[in-house]
Amino acid sequence: MKTRYDSSATDHHFKEGDLVWMYNPKRRRGLSPKLQQNWEGPYTVVKKLNDVVYRVQRSPNAKPKVIHINRLAPYRATYHSSKDYVTSYIMMSLPVEKYKGKLSSQEDSVGFGSASKLVS
């Protein structure tokens, strides 16, 4: 039994300050369990208590939780979830001539900046 479990078990180790997802299934009435979000996060690893138990915290003001490593997964921010995705998509879809003069002089020298700073 142990050999079979170990063959498919993932070997995650987290350091203090790492961002993680926490598995927390909750049954919500009126929504299929298949469509419910079971992973919460990102949480920050506050302290490693032993090899398999970590203390994690959602925000600096939130109460820390003690969680087993089996309920944690590494947090990897997807490119699509970042704010820069929208900016880069807008900039790639516009011809250079259309937005070249519409950025402020400070952003022109540094880079594109955010999409909210475009002037129409």
Image (cartoon, grey):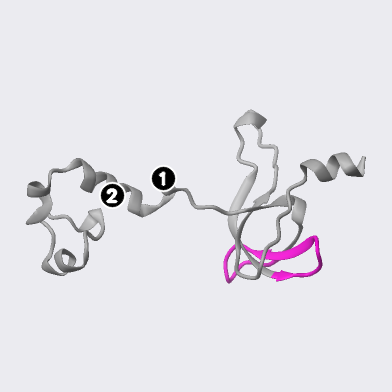
* x 75%, y 56%: residue: 69
Q: Earlier in the sequence, mark 2 or mark 1?
A: 1
What residue sits right under mark 1 in the picture? 80
For the stretch drawn in magenta, the main secondary structure is loop
Which percent across, then down, holds residue 5? Answer: 84, 42
Bounds of the magenta segment: 47-64
Q: How many marks?
A: 2
Residue 42 vs residue 15, the one in the foreground: 15
How many residues crowd around disc 1 within 10 Å: few (fewer than 14), some, or many (20 or more)? few
Q: Quadrant of the N terminus?
A: top right
Please tell me the numbered disc located at residue 17. none
Would residue 39 appear left or right of 109 to someone viewing this image? right
Above or below, 45 against 29 in this view is below
Amino acid tagged 2: Ser
> For residue 7: magenta?
no
Amino acid tagged 1: His
Q: Quadrant of residue 17?
A: bottom right
* x 23%, y 44%: residue: 92
Q: Quadrant of residue 100?
A: bottom left
Please tell me the numbered disc located at residue 88. 2
How many residues crowd around disc 2 within 10 Å: few (fewer than 14), some, or many (20 or more)? some
